[in-house]
Image: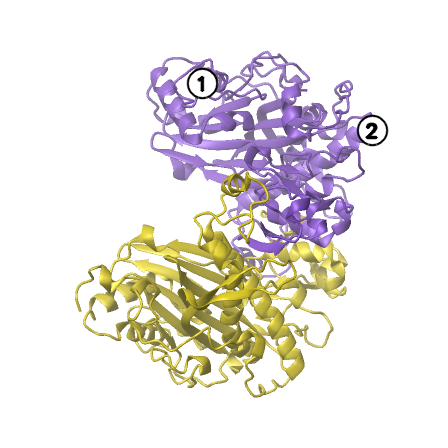
Chain colours: A purple, B yellow
Amino acid sequence: MSAGWFRRHFLSGGPLPEPRPPGPRSSPVPYHRPRFLRGSSPGATDASRRPDARPVRSPARGRTLPWNAGYAEIINAEKSEFNEDQAACGKLCIRRCEFGIEEDQEWLTVCPEEFLTGHYWALFDGHGGPAAAILAANTLHSCLRRQLEAVVEGMMATRPPMNLSGRCVCSSDPQFVEEKGIRAEDLVIGALESAFQECDDVIGRELEASGQVGGCTALVAVSLQGKLYVANAGDSRAILVRRDEVRLLSSEFTPETERQRIQQLAFIYPELLAGEFTRLEFPRRLKGDDLGQKVLFRDHHMSGWSYKQVEKSDLKYPLIHGQGRQARLLGTLAVSRGLGDHQLTVLDTNIQLKPFLLSIPQVTVLDMDQLVPKEDDVVVMATDGLWDVLSNEQVARLVRSFLSGNRGDPHRFSELAKVLIHNTQGKDDGATGEGQVSYDDISVFVIPLHSHGQGGSGH
Amino acid sequence: MSAGWFRRHFLSGGPLPEPRPPGPRSSPVPYHRPRFLRGSSPGATDASRRPDARPVRSPARGRTLPWNAGYAEIINAEKSEFNEDQAACGKLCIRRCEFGIEEDQEWLTVCPEEFLTGHYWALFDGHGGPAAAILAANTLHSCLRRQLEAVVEGMMATRPPMNLSGRCVCSSDPQFVEEKGIRAEDLVIGALESAFQECDDVIGRELEASGQVGGCTALVAVSLQGKLYVANAGDSRAILVRRDEVRLLSSEFTPETERQRIQQLAFIYPELLAGEFTRLEFPRRLKGDDLGQKVLFRDHHMSGWSYKQVEKSDLKYPLIHGQGRQARLLGTLAVSRGLGDHQLTVLDTNIQLKPFLLSIPQVTVLDMDQLVPKEDDVVVMATDGLWDVLSNEQVARLVRSFLSGNRGDPHRFSELAKVLIHNTQGKDDGATGEGQVSYDDISVFVIPLHSHGQGGSGH
């Protein structure tokens, strides 16, 4: 747990509960199956799916990813095993299942070998302790594999069939699927959405069973069938960097970006605020002197601003308060999506945060066939600490200048990830411009998109 | 009322309730004040705010806009006074008000003259009778004027003050307003949002009092302080057409585009479906044969698709059903935002549609100073019938070719609106490509953006 993080993410003013040390790492048995990830040597697959992307984390602590033991390309960057930042990556092996003939029959595994393979990268930025981030790093890939296996048959068709067993109940089924524009990638998006939700349930049960607390954001990239899926729940970010393009692959979910959703929930269920908070947004917290004045405000249905006459109830602490990085949900949390936080309450109250949080990610799809990646095209995934200090353009400049100057280095992608982190710590200069420094834990993946088999520049 | 419209917008299968003829047109007194609109001759203001835009409507019927009697530029296009399509446009005269010193004092009008002027164009596409569209055409501008007058003081500042009376309660107020990025245009957006909501309340009361029924979509453009605001609730559309740019100024709100919002509401309040509908989306309506099968589906939290085993409750009629233009909310309505429909129920049931409908528009802002409009730059606003038949690009081609060939014609913008409508009726050929024809009522505004004072091409 980082004290700095806690300072910035929780209400100051009262004594913070002493974080409990996480219990022994438990692999939730039904969700962590060894067949999901297997040790693989880098370069064994094509580059758009290859596993030689490097996660590099702020070199304050050191830890190994337990289920990646055979995975030579992970760099631990000296982080503690119990750091609030956790990462995971590896090969995704999806088996083919077939629906039994009997309606109540269990799914039958007809193909014990790998049927479809992909790659998986994930960053989890914990808060309130590392427990949720550790559970997510150990669990989410298994949830995703199971969700993908449940629909893999549909994913193999040009158009997913209306009916998974292949039995055509209605002769116009393909036409309906086409009219709805349903593609194989929609099944992967659906699987990612379900996997995040399932993982959140697992984390909730595990935290309760072990008496632990905490939550985490989750940013996941999955390379599958020639597409890169980026799923984000929280304030981490992924960008695509090419020679003349920087493209956002995720957007952040914070109390500020999800204001209307959160205010609307409080409008529908006012009891969630227990009479302690006001749903309305004001430019600053109101004071007694404001009573009766007409001040700027926004409610759940408004994108614009208006004026209202201040009533006594408007003087309560706002549901969402603060600006930019300082914005907090119920004075407590800086993110509005993620995993965990099932027990999180506002300090010294029973007001729960979980009802306002979503575990569902937003998913962006990058079609590698359309993209035709060049040698130095990469995806940079990083937790919020990097983006607090470096803009997308600054990161892109660092990426381009570093990669073009280090063509011969087989470890240049992990070196680049280190360079990016060093730039947030004042260890490199020039790029940060304003010389800002981050004290947050930072984790970075740099994922090269180019396949060397496609005629790269030959090293 | 158009029978064709009814055929396409309501469930078939049962007898339709006989539409009641609308009662005598009543101007709801508190909302319709003569000072809002005054007759003005075209060209009296600069072009970016000038009133010589033309609404042209399908020449099936004829009506005049009663409150626009002095407004020479309206073209009635032979529509019936009771057509389901209604339009309104005119000068928007906003007076300055000042907040009294006593907190409970009424607002004092200190400046009886016009303080700020703008222009207003609005299209209302009714359903279930013309009553709501007529009320909206007679009311919305008054609601908007009142909402703008309530905040006009704030609109005149570079940054709206935290406190409307100008009394600074907290010395850091301007800093908070700046941190939140609140601009004068946010007050106009807020006023548009509030005006739509207020107008919806008025329509609800008026319909109930007069025993009438119906609803309408609303698309509004307001030119104010060098900006064009486009507010949309429904499936009409506005686009900006320039020599080498076509820009969407609105997006459509239909059961399909708002699926997740609508499904989520049914998830929160399942009683709204009265056990008669299923919240889930399937590619087609399920049949008894599907029971026990794994079929494609989506729930409220999903952007992607997945498979689920069909249960008996999945065989109910879907909350949202059909594809594209055929998609219906509760089998009844083709739009998910608009005004009115307070009494609308699913045929032969008590299931209300209003809880699923929003009256709040989405507002887009076009900064005329940044745009620097050229002579043939126009905004085209039209009800859905036009866009069913012509793509944005097809409309843009018609606009460019017509305007460049008719430079000398002082009525070329209204002629252009007619040409656009004729193109949807098979009266012109070439542009529609596939020769599609619309049988819907269609209304079109063509709003020229260029100021002739800025050195136009001299006619």
Q: Residue at x 67, y 61 (%)?
A: B286
- Which sits in the foreground, B334 or A36? B334
Write the residue at 61% across / 40% down. A255
Task: Classify mark 1: residues with Cα within 10 Å, few (<14), some (14-19) or many (20+).
Answer: many
Q: Is residue A41 left or right of residue A407?
A: right
Query: Where is residue A351 drawn, in percent x and y?
Result: 77, 40
The outermost residue toward the front is B101
> Is the residue under label 2 in contact with that under label 1 (CB below 8 Å)?
no
**Chain on which label 2 sits:** A
Residue lying furthest left in this view? Answer: B458
- Amino acid at circle 2: Ala
Which image quadrant for residue A328?
top right
From the viewer's side, name the closer residue of B238 and A151: B238
Q: Which residue is mark 1?
A: A416
User: In x, y percent, where is residue B188?
Assistant: 48, 57
**First of labels 1, 2 by sequence position:** 2
Q: CA distance from mark 1 to mark 2?
A: 40 Å
Residue topped by disc 2: A209
Q: Residue at x 41, y 37 (%)?
A: A369
Is any part of residue A126 visible from this angle? Answer: yes
Image: B188 above or below A351: below
Kind of residue indicated by mark 1? Leu
Where residue B177 appears, as percent x and y from the top left, is 52, 43
Where disc 1 sits, the SS reads helix
